[in-house]
Amino acid sequence: MENLIHKIKAAIALSSEAEEYVRSIAKERKVSKGDVLIREGQSVNKTFFVVDGSLRSFCVDNEGKEHTLQFAIKDWWISDFMAIYNHEPASLTVECITDSVVIEFNAQKLSEIYIPFPEFESFQRKNLERHVVSLHKRILNQLQLTATERYSLFLKQYPNIEQYVPNYHIASYLGITQQSLSRIRAKKANK
């Protein structure tokens, strides 16, 4: 919880009342590798801040193939935001890739924070802006970069993640096969 409070205080002036409110609507959870926090098709009312560990969100296409949309590591947020904001069933599954610690928020209570503490609006707006920019970059990278360039960018964005994320998740995120990922790695190792 202290990580999140520190992150908020770095962005906005946080009164003791506001800090107390955040603590009252948050629940720190230890989750195990393989735990599913959100399952495709279910109703979603939670959002998660990653304190430690690694999670991913993914969808499954009509042929049963998984497509990883996002990895979430320390200090990142993850949920199915489309489901929350559009009040529809989850289109994504959120699972733990490693044993992790998350701070869980009820999305409705989190959105109500603006009423008593309007200073949170700028904090959340900045989070939303970063999220939108990140998604746009990801889309453009998928469209414009080669698989090798996407892999290099992935390594910069998620340093050391390869140590604990299975290759098929990384390949899924990059939009390539595991065999292509192996070839890219072999070429990089030979340089």
Image (cartoon, rainbow, N blue to C red):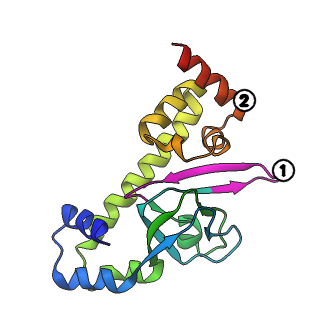
| Disc 2: CA contacts within 10 A as few (<14), some (14-19) or many (>=20) | few
x then y, percent, for residue 61: 77, 52
Residue 147, x across and y down, in percent: 60, 27
Residue at 59% x, 25% y: name it: 185
Residue furthest out toward the top: 191
Which badge, 1 or 2, comes first in the chain's sequence? 1
Q: Which residues are magenta?
A: 58-76
Closer mark to the observer between disc 1 and disc 2: 2
Type of the residue with mark 2: Gln
Mark 2 falls on what kind of element?
Answer: helix
Give the CA separation, mark 1 to mark 2: 19 Å
Residue 78: x %, y % from top left: 49, 62
Q: Who's the residue at 68% across and 56% down the image? A: 59
Confirm whether residue 146 shows in the render. Answer: no
Figure quadrant of the N terminus: bottom left
Q: Position of residue 168 (x, y in %)?
A: 68, 42
The label number, if any, that marks residue 179 in the structure image:
2
Quarter occupied by residue 33: bottom right
Q: Which residue occupies the foreground of this view, 105 or 55?
A: 55
Residue 111 is at least partly visible in this image: yes
Residue 63's label in the rendered image is 1
Q: Residue at x 47, y 33 (%)?
A: 153
Tell me if residue 85 comes above or below residue 169 in the rendering: below
State the residue at coordinates (68%, 34%): 176
Picture quadrant of residue 43: bottom right
Residue 70 magenta-drawn? yes
Query: In the rendered image of this protein, does residue 1 appear above or below residue 97?
Result: below
Residue type at mark 1: give it. Answer: Glu
